[in-house]
Amino acid sequence: MVKKSIPYGKQYIDEEDIQAVIDVLQSDYLTTGPNIAEFEKKFAYYVGAKYAVAISNGTAALHASCHVAGISDGDEVITTPMTFAASSNAIVYCGGKPVFADIDEKTYNINPKEIRKKITSKTKAIIPVHYTGQPCKMDEIHQIAKEYNLIVIEDAAHALGAEYKGKKIGSISHMTTFSFHPVKHITTGEGGMVTTNDESIYKELLLFRSHGITRDVDMLNNKDEGAWYYEQLKLGYNYRMTDFQCALGISQLKKLDNFIFKRKKIINMYNEAFKNIKGITIPYQEEELDSSWHLYVIQIDNKILNKDRKEIFNILRNAGIGVNVHYIPVYYFPYYKQLGYEKGLCPKAEALYERIITLPLFPSMSYSDVEYVIDIIRNLISDKESL
Ligand SMILES: *Cc1c(COP(=O)(O)O)cnc(C)c1O
């Protein structure tokens, strides 16, 4: 038998996607052409936001959002430790201080009660992360933001297509960021997006993405120069996406709902297989919320299963199953330690980290591969029962 090799996540690219990229490569504009605005328009429409700004990747989208939120030296921004380092790094890029609030034990998302405990006179913003695609408690978070006059930037790298009480993620906060890395819901290789409903935020994002330079006559100081004229108003970056990336994004966006549908089918198979197994906790889903299922994360109880997480992880990897752990609490990393963060800060996130394993989940995963993963895990359990 050929050895299995199932990744934990993978892009889905078809002929239509490939053709869309080729068409741009044969056209006049590889960058700053018409595909960027088209991708932004279609993306904004999909999530129900007024504006969308394409940015070179999800991390740059977070950086742009923190900058436009006005985060600067000494400002505190509250976020979760159960995330990819980028959510927190973006705060540091701007001179801000990440303040980690603990998670809810059931959803693994940032807990609004814990956010409240972390607010000080220096708090400027909150960055909730919709872990695995399940939306955070946004009503509670917006309430806190209103009381303390804070900006809310949602990190929705996992949550494209997810819904909070009937509204698509991307339509409800000051800014929401997305990523198009190949393991995410749709891909452009590298790519990202910020959505907003606020015109002034939108304009600031455009400036930040392209050196702080504008040709918009309304924004120029000197309005009497010729057609060549532009001004750099602020310090920005080159955080643009290319036209061929955006063409791929436009093509991928058409398939997004099908991708999510397929993810949900796989989730149902996993949930059915594991829901009655003692020692495994399947993901908890809140009513009124619709997760877009970026990741399928189970908790392993090593006392019941008689094997620790590392052993189980290795057995699954040796069986060709690309399991992973999402996430190591951000402040565990040496870089953050050196900034002064210590273990013990968020006990619930730390306890969760000891127990989680991410199983493979992606739209092109075959049902027989899903069955294979389920069988291997079931065997682990019966192993234990025969002891
Ligand atoms: C992937 C991811 C990012 C970063 O996105 P990139 O496009 O890889 O820069 C940020 N936050 C979270 C939660 C992510 O999963």
Image (cartoon, helix red, strand yellow):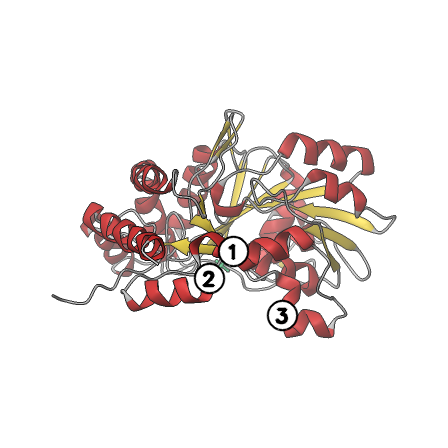
User: With respect to residue 140, does 39 lie above or below?
Assistant: below
Which percent across, then down, holds residue 2?
14, 67
User: Horizontally, is 384 left or right of 364 in the view?
Assistant: right
Q: How many marks?
A: 3
Q: Nearer the N terminus, badge 1 or badge 3?
A: 3
Amino acid type of disc 1? Arg
Q: Foreground residue, 200 or 92?
A: 92
Residue drawn at point x = 62 percent, y = 70 percent:
333
Residue 276 in the image: state x and y as whole percent: 38, 38
Q: Amino acid at mark 3?
A: Phe
Q: Which residue is mark 2?
A: 309
Horizontal arrangement in the rendering, residue 313 relative to residue 197 (left or right):
left
Say what amino acid the circle numbered 2 marks: Arg
- Mark 1 in CB contact with mark 2 (< 8 angstroms): yes
Mark 1–mark 3 Cα distance, whole angstroms, equals 18 Å
> Which residue lies under the disc numbered 1?
355
Sequence order check: which comes first, mark 1 or mark 2?
2
Q: Residue at x 65, y 74 (%)?
A: 334
Residue in the foreground of this view, choosing between 38 and 102: 102
Could you say whether the residue bearing mark 2 is in a helix, strand or loop? helix
